[in-house]
Amino acid sequence: MRPDLEEQLRMADYAIQRPGANGSDRERQQQAQDAVHGAEEELLKAVLSLNSMGIQLKGPLEGLIDFPSYRDGELVELCWKLGEERVEHWHRIGEGFSGRKKL
């Protein structure tokens, strides 16, 4: 989830717990909750869309994805990270990022 939305929700939650909280504070809290919920729904849709293409989101903050492929007859995962120009790494199933090898 986006850190800015989380912070807005924390601040709104704090504001409505104060003794002087009013309707405006409750409205801001509801808006913050709605924004967080909307962002969570968008993230879920994006992950489901990736999954439908065979892409696994491994590290959302780093922009790390894996997708299945065959290498010398063995099922492996190709690995790409945000900022990399092209897919240049692979690893065996279950090895993860630490097992990355150059293609």
Image (cartoon, rainbow, N blue to C red):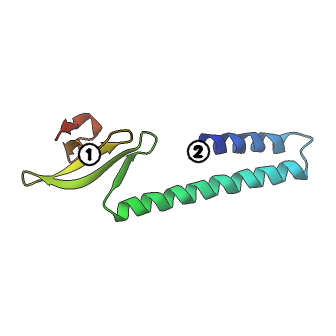
Q: How many marks?
A: 2
Which x, y percent locates residue 12? 77, 44
Q: Residue at x 75, y 39 (%)?
A: 11
Q: Amino acid at mark 1?
A: Val
Q: Residue furthest top?
A: 98
Q: Residue furthest bottom?
A: 52
Image position of 62 (left or right of 19): left
The C terminus, quarter of image: top left
Q: Amino acid at mark 2?
A: Arg
Q: Quadrant of residue 2?
A: top right
Q: Earlier in the sequence, mark 1 or mark 2?
A: 2
Q: Residue furthest front?
A: 85
Q: Secondary structure at mark 1?
A: loop
Crowd band around label 2 with a 10 angstrom C-alpha radius: few (<14), some (14–19), many (20+): few
Q: Which residue is mark 1?
A: 87
Q: Which residue is mark 2?
A: 2
Q: Residue at x 28, y 38 (%)?
A: 97
Q: Residue at x 49, y 59 (%)?
A: 44
State the mark number for residue 22.
Answer: none
Q: Residue at x 76, y 55 (%)?
A: 30
Which x, y percent locates residue 62? 42, 39
